[in-house]
Amino acid sequence: MPTAPVPAQGVPQGEFVQAEGSVPDGTHLAPTPPAVPVVVAAAEAPAPDVPVGETPAEAAPVQETPAVVQETPAQVAPTPDVQTDATPEEGTPANGTPVDGPPAAPEQAVTTPEPPMAPEQTQAAVPVEPPADAPPQHAPEPPSAPAAEAGTEPVAVPQEAEPSAEAEVPTPADQPVVVPAEQPGEAPAPLAVVPAEQPDDVPAQPGDVPAEQPGEASAQLADAPAEQSADVSTEQPATPAEHPADAPAQPADVPAEQSVTVPAPRDGGPVAQSAAQSVPADPEVLAAGDAQPQPVPAEQALSVADEPVAAQPQSAPAEPTGTTPEPVPAERRPEPAPQPEVAAPASDAVQAVPSVPQEVPSVPQESVPPRPVPQPEPVQPAQSIQEESVLSVQPEPTAHAGPEAPQTPQAPAQEAAPAADVPEGPQVIETAEVPEPAAAPATPPAPGYDDAEREAVLRVMRERRDIRNGFRSDPIPHEVLLRVLEAAHTAPSVGHSQPWDFVVIRSAETRRAMHELASRQRDAYAKSLPKARAKQFKELKIEAILDTPVNIVVTADPTRGGRHTLGRHTQPQMAPYSSALAVENLWLAARAEGLGVGWVSFFDEREMVRALGLPEHLEVVAYLCVGYVDEFPEEPELLQAGWSKRRPLSWVVHEETYGRRALPGEEPHDLLQETVSNIRPLDAKALGEAWERQKRMTKPAGALGMLEIISAQLSGLARVCPPPIPEPAAVAIFAGDHGVHAQGVTAWPQEVTSQMVANFLGGGAVCNAFANQVGAEVCVIDVGVAGDLPATPGLLPRKVRAGTADFTTGPALSREDVLAAIEVGIETARDLVAAGNKALLTGEMGIANTTVSAALICVYTGQDPAEVTGRGTGINDEMHARKVDVVRRALDLHKPEPADPVGVLSAVGGLEHAALVGFILGGASLRVPVLLDGVSAGAAALVARAVAPEALAACIAGHRSAEPGHVAALNKLGLRPLVDLDLRLGEGTGALLALPVVQSAARAMHEVATFDSAGVTEK
């Protein structure tokens, strides 16, 4: 029969939000096909070919209820989830229970406009399936309504609702319906629509309908002839749906039909058309709503939008008839997308589940047995709903690519409570608790500077310099100096204690007195430096006290604020730290004013306090020289002079824990792998230039022998010819103890290791004498000494563990210990190079470490332990035989694989050997020459080559040890020693003796003239 036009509506897709304490069923969990929210009113007479009261296969039973229904605010109606695949016999509901209700009378839908819904509160409703095996239900008999226009079926279109302050739960008069999930190999079922035969005087079904998606729903529903919506039920198989036997009973007072929701516009778009603004109905789309809705008890009201919306009042429920419109074509029907199960905390009454309008597929879906319905928690007052919606929790539905939507394991449903127990009025359904992400702030963060202002601030920081040269005598205006001091005074301080004071010195007499104090301290410091460093220091200008018109002394008062100053209870040193921040502010403000600042630290603090007449309780934090300058250098002056190098940012940023280095936005990097990746071969261009220069130097070709090879190697390593002279230099002595000492491989007790470390630090060892002679720095690193060492200047405490285990009974180290020790070596190389050292020398100390060195050399050379095991500290024949046997037993026990260098060190290595491996790799990655000492350094070089073969390009063999294993190692490495004096001491002594030779090779490249420059005739 002809029908009235159907307004365009979006096609929502349902999602499930589990209620707290409920057990989800399969249909409840599965995504539902989109449905068009239409209510088709019948003509005055029922269809002649369809018996009145006949319902689709999946329609819920109806029960006779009173004609008068209370008007209660309804909550957002969920997407109906009703199958229409099969039509049961007349008067039989989907679950097989006969329906005792009388035939339905004709009805006409009455639409009631709803207030528009706010964008943040327009959320799609979530479907809920009715309980299985419900008793017979009787639909209410509504009062008569005026007949619709002859020959047409008016369609009621739900209106978009305004957001309400409180969520309202459906009463027995407005219960949601569900559509079963799509099964494999089956097409989705048409969505629910009220049949053509309806009784009179039936108003529109209430329901909060979110706003439709702009531009999508209207296109799908336009120009749809209504007459194609009839007589479709005869095409469906008359097989009733099977319900679980343990499903809860259906409540008594349940209306026969429910409204269908439309997804809210994501962008807060305009409200949908009213029912009066009807458009021609598309028969293919109209068929999407032809199935009978199933009633749901009030206690099983589904989880709805977290932003509650008030529904329009309901006058009377409508009673369905048995007609079923034909299904929607395939090109118009969407496939349900798998929807994740999302639940909200109990504090939030309901959760919003967004849905996406989809095109409707064509093939009807076969009947699917519904699953048990979850039992919600007892309802709570509506005012408990929070306005803060966790919209970010709800995932965006996507198109379902597979034949079946994902199912959630189900459990037996709880017994449903009678609908009469549900209080009338606004109600809240609690949902299951899930972790809730932090809600987005209600207000935006405070604004930052614009690009130009930010760049100006960063530029001041980048261009701040510690100035010593180029000061001018121009006076500083008072207003300029005042601005600088004001900036310093605004610095942060612990507990807002503001412990600083600023002593401004302009007097020439006072500045001369300070200059004399600084000069005396400068000379004392120079005497403490190694020879190469002292020479370098004397070339530096360290202060400009007399060159600047203003000097400023910044002090810290540790007593300011009293004993209970906030933040100083456990950190009393916070006062000078806070004053240091004032120094930084002063420095940056001065740079912005075009003023240079030089920090002078060569003072005895107490002597300065007395000379300036300061109170004795004050601490001097900084003595600053301030004045205008000719120019600001591009780089710090100490960097330009080669005193030190800038450390990269990636070295000093750690994520979560120290040593886990990662810049923001990057993954943490492995220090060993990063170091190996930076090792490169010698530069071919620089090598060629070095050999050409050797030919043109005023000497016969090859006359310098090995020195020419060394000079070319240094040029290729530095990528420049002539190469930098490798001074200053530092020798790193790694100290550790060994568990194999218990096997009697040496005559010296193990505590000698700790005693020799103290001797190094005191300057009384052979390495100290040789270092003083050649001007090198001695650096001692505790990587694994068995005893505790006191903190001493020059000692780097980097203990991985207190000595190794006895490798004759088990592994000497764990792989983690090996990697940690290697990183100690890499870090030591980085520190020494950043401090300005241009050559690294290897050294070690550890009683019984020559036994470990022999085992490592055997692994990488393949020689027998008897051939490479020496006498070490001078042991006798009996002890030497025991030492050889210990090495052989360890190798037989572990059978280390040379291709696994970390595994080799774990089996038979030592902590100082692993640290030396890292030291060699670190120096090679920084392209600094590494001078190897004796047998332990040779063993470490073999392991380093196994890790990174190109690391040998940075290695120079300082000497040949008397230990037979060292000779085997050098031969395997292909290195020619510079010194052969039968040394077997260790401590870096052989490398120290070779250092002047290496430095001489580089200096010759700088200072020896060529035939052309000297005017010497070549042969």
Image (cartoon, rainbow, N blue to C red):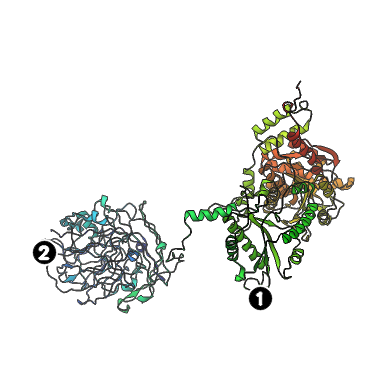
x then y, percent, for residue 882? 84, 47
x then y, percent, for residue 74? 28, 72
Q: Quadrant of the N terminus?
A: bottom left
Label 2 neighbour load within 10 Å: few <14, some 14-19, many 20+: some
Q: Can you say whether 422 is above or below 410 in the image?
A: below
Q: Quadrant of the C terminus?
A: top right
Q: Amino acid at mark 1?
A: Gly
Furthest residue in direction top, as rendered: 1019
Question: Circle 2 sits on which residue?
Answer: 149
- Earlier in the chain: of badge 1 and badge 2, it is 2
Q: Secondary structure at mark 1?
A: loop
Give whichever of 31, 383 is nearer the camera: 383
- Residue 898, can we see it? no
Residue 517 in which image quadrant = bottom right
Q: Nearer the viewer, mark 1 or mark 2?
A: 1
Q: Amino acid at mark 2?
A: Glu
x then y, percent, for residue 922? 68, 46
Question: Circle 1 sits on which residue?
Answer: 562
Work out how far the residue at label 1 is from the one at label 2, CA to CA, in angstroms.
91 Å
